[in-house]
Image (cartoon, grey):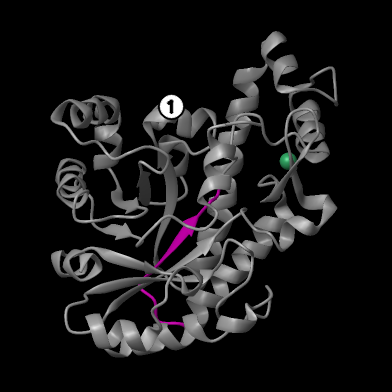
Amino acid sequence: MTIKEIIDYGGTLVFDPLETTLTPDDFLIKYGEIVNGICLVAKSEFGTTYYPSGTAPADERFSQTFAAFAQVATDLGITTYAMIHGNKDSFFSRDPNFQMKKSGGRQIEHYVCPNQNGYWQYMGEIASEIAKHTEVSGIIIKDFLYPRDTSCFCDHCKRTFASDTNYHSRDFTLENLKQDGKINDWNTKRLETIRDFSKTVVNRIHKEKKLDVMTEILLDPKTDFFDGASNHFGQDLNYISQAVSHVLLHIYPWSDFPKTETELNKFYDEIKPKLSKLAEMENSLYIWGLDLEKYPIARQIQDTLGSRNIFFTEGNPPSYPDRRSLHLELGV
Ligand SMILES: [Zn+2]
């Protein structure tokens, strides 16, 4: 069985009760003997929590899962990480004041504008609850991002950019910014936003405990690896390194894993300019749907990048088709 072998090799499973048929008891019975570490999702991408939160709504079906599992796992000496999904948040995005908008004004459903201090504080409060009430070793903050360069063009983002940079218009599109030579200023603002969002949450965690905190960078050939992460998603290694000392490299989310040496070398060529920066900090890998075919390649990448952990899921999340078309801007 794939999961067992990957855990046996040292991979760290990401456990989301919505995405698995395993219960925490099943997991411990099956893998308790061999497991060294586990990552438990605490806040889902729907905005609900798997513990009784004083801040966010709990998922009715799994309102005790995270807290109970984290307790048992740490009691057994298993290194336990919590994962919180960021501004992919179906609950919070219902509030019209916080909705993410595309260039041109259309709402991006299920996403919250990341450029909102009120949301930073909300996420900080959730992270702080986890640090305070559980004995986890670290927290992964995932989905702190813009889904594509065409977002976010909500009124708040446009207004603050116009006043910060003396831009002549308060109602503009991505095309306007390109035509007016403002795109670099706009992109820098987005990188600062994701950095400051991360910083706010990290600071709240560290106020409770000095936990290991990781934040994500999406690296895919279809979005030019680090370049696309920066230009589309606002996830820039240099900026993010100002907020955390451990980065989570989510590799090949939208494309097939490299199968040949040539494909793998292409990946290394892309990564090479970032190796010295990566060497200054810690990194771990994150892989959706890791299996035994991909695993040896993941290990090679781990060795090359000096990655501490390989976090993995059994399959793609249910939101995968929507995420993929949004991030790659397919058919929209
Ligand atoms: Zn916005």
Quarter of the image for the N terminus: give it: bottom left
Q: Residue at x 68, y 59 (%)?
A: 90
Q: Position of residue 179 (x, y in %)?
A: 70, 9
Look at the image and tell me whether residue 153 can be seen: yes
In the picture, measured across the screen, residue 272 lies left or right of residue 286, that is: left
The one of 305 and 162 positioned closer to us in this rendering: 305
Q: Does the magenta segment cover residue 180?
A: no
Q: Residues within 10 Å of mark 1 (few under 14, many from 20)?
A: some
Mark 1 sits on what residue?
227
Look at the image and tell me whether residue 77 can be seen: no
> Vertically, is 241 above or below 160?
below
Q: Position of residue 162 (x, y in %)?
A: 79, 26
Q: Look at label 1 and name its amino acid.
A: Asp
Q: Does the magenta segment cover residue 142?
A: yes
Q: Which residues are magenta?
A: 134-144
Q: Position of residue 172 (x, y in %)?
A: 80, 23
In the picture, measured across the screen, residue 202 lies left or right of residue 259, that is: right
The one of 101 and 304 positioned closer to us in this rendering: 101
